[in-house]
Image (cartoon, rainbow, N blue to C red):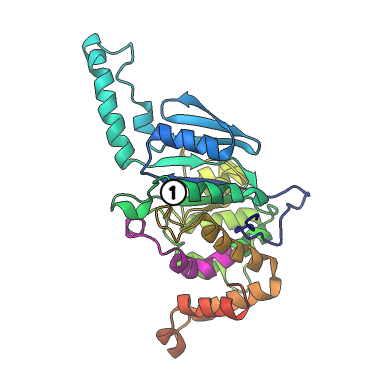
Amino acid sequence: MLMSNRCSMPDIMKTDDGKERRVGVEIELSGLGYQDLVSLSSRLLGGEGKSVARYVSEIATDVGTFVVELDSAPIKDLDLRDPRLPESVRELGGQAMTVIDAAAEKIVPLEIVSPPMPFAELERIETLCDELHKAGARGSREALYFAFGLQLNPELPNLKASTLVRYLQVFAALYEWLKTRHQIDFSRKVTSYIEPWSSTYIDLLIAADYDPDMDQLMKDYLHYNPTRNKALDLLPLFAHLNGNLLARYVKDERIKSRPTLHYRLPDCDIDNPLWHFSTVWNDWVVLEQLVANTTDLSALVTAFRNSRKFSFHNLTHSWAETSTQWLRSRNYV
């Protein structure tokens, strides 16, 4: 009997020009050796792994090329056997690199980066994560210094400022609910990777009359949030939309231009038998469904705006609790 799909799909599956919407997925993990991860991922994804650099392999599949790599540029670039080094250093290089490699695989995350793939193909990621769990993959809970994430890069239906504002408003309203849902591990809570947006910016964003054009939207966001270390990072999208404007506020070679949001909040809790990729994705779909529902979106943002005012109710009820009840009352969860 075929197992039904566990990854829910949003109502808006295509871009305004009629193309299938796509999403990129980034999975950080440990517990497996680099070569073991390449071999296992190649088999599970139905592709062939090919080394393209030290600690970087590509897996060509029918939905695009996946990349498996050690998530640390200094270690990937280190080569003590470089012919430009003195012979005495090169003689020890092989042994030294073996030690460095063994240490790196213990403390530096390995990462699987998917190509932009159609939403409907995400069951592949669900199966991949389930099988990696069975093979001994470890996530954030394994050690205090592991702050491993599972990141989503969903393509927007269009690049209109009004559409982006809707996504940002819903995300601001659902941030506390999402944080509760993901049960963020301590190792990521103490890092700066997943900070919320500036509170002042959120007040501006959810104001009843907020209706900026794209340049003004970018300026407002970047004035208050000039960093990629946000739970929902907009800098890759802004690099795609207007790189010159972005450069006035942020210069960071790690920013990659793409027409997507960059959702950084979730942990990769892959060693937890109760954790599944679909749980993370389906929570994102709740946000997608609210963006598509004008009436509910307006009601949620109004409730969120009111929750930020001084009142007895707000003193005795957390917004995380209130938003959870709101979502349940409208059958989003």
Left or right of residue 289: residue 176? left
Q: Amino acid at mark 1?
A: Lys
User: Residue 243: within the magenta?
Assistant: no
Find residue 249 and report its horizontal and vertical position in percent.
48, 48
Mark 1 — residue? Answer: 134
Q: Residue at x 45, y 67 (%)?
A: 199
Where residue 126 sits: x, y (%)? Answer: 55, 51
Residue 305 shown left or right of residue 188 in the figure: right
Outermost residue to the bottom: 312
Q: Position of residue 51 (x, y in %)?
A: 48, 25
- Quarter that holds the C terminus: bottom right
Question: Range of the magenta residues?
Answer: 168-189
Q: Estimate the x, y position of residue 93 in percent, counting from the top left.
A: 26, 18
Asked whether residue 211 is in view, the answer is no
Magenta span contains residue 182: yes
Q: Residues within 10 Å of mark 1 (few under 14, many from 20)?
A: few
Q: Nearer the viewer, residue 40 or 34?
A: 40
Spot the residue most to the front: 1
Judge left or right: residue 95 versus residue 160.
left
292 versus 15 height, above or below: below
Query: Along the line of sight, which residue is nearer the eye, 226 or 278?
Result: 278
Report the quarter where the N terminus lies: bottom right
Please name the residue shown 63% across and 78% down the image: 330
- Image: 239 above or below 283: above
Whether residue 196 appears in this view of the structure is yes
| Most common SS among magenta residues | helix
